[in-house]
């Protein structure tokens, strides 16, 4: 696991080595907000893997669960409905880890956060948050049961966000056999979540 996190830190350092002010300058395995998802995935692949939680209350965006192609286990790619170019408005890279050590994941999260802070000087770093995802959160998140999330956010001046997260899944959730299990397998994970200002505003409507 230490090697995996070292690789994540190295990649982040390589991808944002110069000072940056724009969310589009942050990459997850070469992908950025504002890119066309069609540059990385086929149109039919995106449509066949669309999920439903971001459309629970507002029919504005679609999110596709895509397989990883490097160090990440999977990606969540969000784009506006009826956008023929599939411009990426939200992007999550998830690294699944079976029964990881929660303290170690949080320590590594801090190291990655420091790297982002040094590269994006004009962002506002929020305090680290720890909270539970309860069953009703499955309406807006692909999880069920009680699971612990440690979250650290960076806010850009235009409202865009980078969020680093450690997910420790509850044993009950891991055993859940609902369709949500097939989405993300209910495993523990480390995540890098990038959102455009428009996508951030969309998600605020659902809170």
Image (cartoon, rainbow, N blue to C red):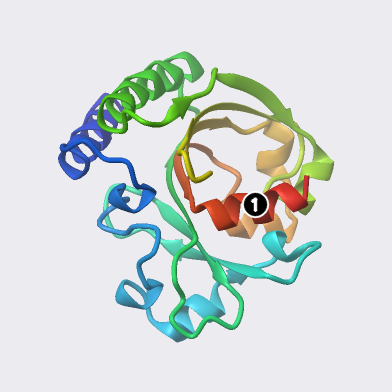
Residue 100 x, y percent position in the rendering: 46, 26
Residue 66 placed where, x, y %? Answer: 45, 65
Residue 69, quarter of picture: bottom left
State which quarter of the image contains the C terminus: top right
Please identify the quadrant where the N terminus is shown: top left
Above or below, comparing residue 140 to residue 1 in the picture: below
Q: Is residue 62 left or right of residue 101?
A: right
Picture coordinates of residue 115 (x, y %)?
27, 26
Residue 189, compared with residue 204, is above or below; it is: above
Residue name at image x 60 percent, y 49 percent? 200
Residue at 33% across / 25% down in the picture? 117
**Above or below 61: residue 110:** above
Residue at image x 38%, y 48%?
A: 23
Quadrant in the picture for residue 35: bottom left
Between 80 and 95, the residue placed more toward the observer is: 80
Residue 85 shows in the view: yes
Above or below — where is 7 with respect to 205?
above
Q: Which residue is mark 1?
A: 201
Say which residue appears at 28% left-offset and 50% top-offset.
25
Q: State how many labels appear.
A: 1
Secondary-structure class at tag 1: helix
Judging depth in this view, the residue of 52 and 95 nearest the camera is: 52
Q: Residues within 10 Å of mark 1 (few under 14, many from 20)?
A: few
Image check: 37 left or right of 188? left
Residue 141 in sight here? no
């Amino acid at each position: 696991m230490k090697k995996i996190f070292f690789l994540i830190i190295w990649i982040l350092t390589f991808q944002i080595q110069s000072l940056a002010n724009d969310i589009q300058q942050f990459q997850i395995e070469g992908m950025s907000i504002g890119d066309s998802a069609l540059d990385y995935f086929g149109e039919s692949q995106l449509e066949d893997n669309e999920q439903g939680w971001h459309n629970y209350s507002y029919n504005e965006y679609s999110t596709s669960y895509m397989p990883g192609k490097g160090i990440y286990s999977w990606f969540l790619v969000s784009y506006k409905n009826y956008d023929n170019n599939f411009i990426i408005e939200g992007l999550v890279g998830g690294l699944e880890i079976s029964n990881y050590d929660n303290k170690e994941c949080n320590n590594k999260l801090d190291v990655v956060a420091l790297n982002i802070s040094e590269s994006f000087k004009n962002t506002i770093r929020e305090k680290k948050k720890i909270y539970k995802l309860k069953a009703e959160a499955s309406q807006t998140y692909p999880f069920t049961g009680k699971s612990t999330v440690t979250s650290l956010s960076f806010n850009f001046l235009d409202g865009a966000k980078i969020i680093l997260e450690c997910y420790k899944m509850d044993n009950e959730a891991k055993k859940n056999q609902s369709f949500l299990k097939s989405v993300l397998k209910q495993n523990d994970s480390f995540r890098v979540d990038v959102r455009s200002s428009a996508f951030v505003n969309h998600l605020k409507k659902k809170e």
